[in-house]
Image (spheres, rainbow, N blue to C red):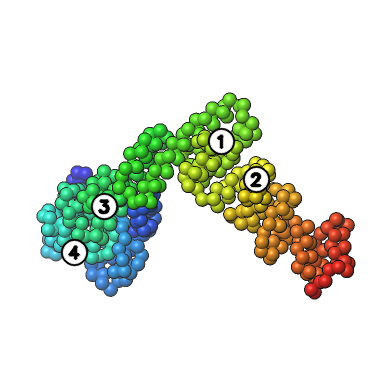
């Protein structure tokens, strides 16, 4: 911005500057979302340049020297200018209103100290590579993330990227700040170039994969994910990328088919329970719940079949049973719930088995308002006696409580429970008959 001398004097004499600090989460390269900024005031300005007697606090709020984490200025124009700026100070012996330019006298150390206080500084006078690197060293030694980031922005603008990358490769603190800053401003191209230079192939691949978040069209996102499959991920991440692509491919097919069925209005499940949202881009467990809700009886050969999803994505038995139970209980399909836990041995005998534990089955059934007869059946299947009694009492499964107290020969507990059932009810009569029975040898 061009100013007259009078404008400049008014600007420098009237402007007030503040320094800011950015608090952010630790920069984990495996995470696929950026941290949020939190802006807090750092400190009031002091006129005395010698602040050694002040408590020195880093941008993160920790004692200086403890550690350094990435940060950035809220408005870097508050601390830097694109063109050489002048700082004016009265000089003794000169008429009032005359000033002398001291900016060229500032050393890298002086400049960094002023930046840390949020004062306006021009970094343009540092023209040689040696001076620029010394400025960076001073910033790093100050343990202030804002200042480090400000200097890095200056270097990014004034050095070719090959030289910048080469020098940062041996300065890991500054390198981490630059990576964090590039992610914050979304400079994906320079970030990818940096990872290529550093030969950090997995981070390069993850950074490329993150771009799928910016693609809204499902078909285009699917095609982009396909290009990510061959990238140099770790074995675990490679499997995740493949599953992500396959899942979206399935979701696109299921969504198109179900939208057609819903609009046609001829399928009972869609008439009774209209879909609340699209299945596109939903997590795997949500897709499985959707499939168990709308497509539970479909043959394994169809893409929307729950069993097909289970086998394709190697969903563990516990997760599958838990999700299928929640879906079928929500529909009050109690026959499906019963079949979910019924197994046959090689002799043809049936038995109830729950990989998630029958206590969890009871909780889910109650949450979905299962009839008391069904609740009692599954409460009875809980092996731990104390857990069984607690659940039966909590959900008013009276017969289970009465029978368990009888089997435990616990007369006192049965007497106490008598007061919790309705007077004149069948449960009260059953308790009275047991208490008066001479065939039971009570233990108390």
Q: Secondary structure at mark 3?
A: loop
Mark 1 and mark 2 lie on one chain; the one further toward the N terminus is 1
Q: Residues within 10 Å of mark 1 (few under 14, many from 20)?
A: few
Of tags 4 and 2, the one toward the viewer is 2
Given residues 131 and 257, the one toward you in this image is 257
CB atoms of marks 4 and 2 within 8 Å? no
Q: CA distance from mark 3 to mark 2?
A: 51 Å
CB atoms of marks 3 and 4 within 8 Å? no
**Taking 240 as reference, is 275 above or below it?**
above
CB atoms of marks 3 and 2 within 8 Å? no
Q: Quadrant of the N terminus?
A: top left
Percent across and percent down for residue 170 are 19, 59
Q: Secondary structure at mark 4?
A: helix
Q: Secondary structure at mark 1?
A: loop
Q: CA distance from mark 3 to mark 4?
A: 33 Å
Percent across and percent down for residue 274 are 60, 34
Percent across and percent down for residue 131 are 13, 58
Mark 3 and mark 4 lie on one chain; the one further toward the N terminus is 4
- Provide the residue designation for mark 3: 200
Q: CA distance from mark 3 to mark 1?
A: 45 Å
């Amino acid at each position: 911005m061009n100013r007259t001398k009078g404008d400049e004097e008014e600007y420098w004499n009237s402007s007030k500057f503040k320094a800011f600090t950015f608090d952010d989460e630790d920069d984990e390269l495996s995470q696929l979302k950026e941290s949020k900024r939190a802006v807090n005031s750092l400190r009031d300005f002091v006129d005395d340049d010698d602040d050694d007697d002040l408590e020195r606090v880093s941008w993160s709020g920790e004692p200086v020297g403890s550690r350094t984490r990435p940060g950035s200025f809220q408005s870097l124009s508050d601390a830097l200018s694109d063109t050489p700026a002048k700082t004016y100070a009265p000089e003794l012996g000169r008429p009032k209103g005359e000033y002398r330019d001291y900016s060229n006298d500032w050393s890298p150390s002086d400049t960094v100290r002023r930046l840390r206080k949020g004062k306006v500084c021009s970094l343009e006078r540092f023209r040689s590579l040696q001076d620029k690197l010394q400025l960076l060293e001073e910033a790093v030694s100050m343990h202030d993330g804002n200042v480090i980031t400000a200097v890095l922005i200056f270097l990014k603008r004034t050095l070719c990227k090959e030289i910048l990358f080469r020098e940062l490769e041996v300065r890991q603190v500054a390198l981490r700040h630059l990576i964090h800053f590039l992610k914050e401003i979304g400079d994906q191209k320079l970030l990818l170039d940096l990872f290529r230079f550093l030969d950090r192939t997995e981070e390069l691949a993850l950074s490329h994969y993150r771009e799928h978040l910016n693609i809204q069209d499902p078909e285009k996102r699917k095609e982009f994910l396909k290009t990510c499959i061959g990238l140099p991920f770790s074995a675990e991440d490679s499997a995740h990328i493949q599953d992500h692509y396959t899942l979206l491919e399935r979701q696109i097919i299921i969504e198109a088919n179900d939208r057609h069925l819903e609009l046609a209005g001829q399928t009972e499940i869609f008439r009774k329970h209209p879909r609340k949202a699209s299945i596109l881009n939903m997590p795997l467990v949500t897709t499985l719940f959707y499939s168990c809700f709308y497509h539970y009886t479909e043959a394994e050969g169809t893409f929307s079949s729950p069993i097909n999803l289970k086998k394709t994505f190697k969903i563990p038995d516990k997760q599958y049973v838990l999700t299928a139970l929640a879906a079928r209980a929500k529909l009050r399909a109690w026959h499906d719930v019963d079949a979910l836990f019924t197994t046959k041995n090689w002799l043809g005998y049936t038995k109830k088995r729950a990989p998630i534990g029958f206590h969890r089955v009871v909780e889910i059934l109650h949450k979905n308002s299962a009839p008391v007869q069904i609740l009692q059946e599954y409460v009875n299947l809980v092996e731990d006696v104390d857990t069984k009694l607690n659940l039966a009492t909590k959900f008013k499964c009276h017969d289970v409580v009465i029978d368990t107290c009888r089997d435990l020969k616990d007369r006192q507990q049965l007497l106490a429970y008598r007061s919790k059932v309705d007077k004149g009810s069948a449960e009260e009569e059953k308790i009275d008959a047991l208490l008066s029975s001479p065939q039971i040898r009570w233990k108390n």
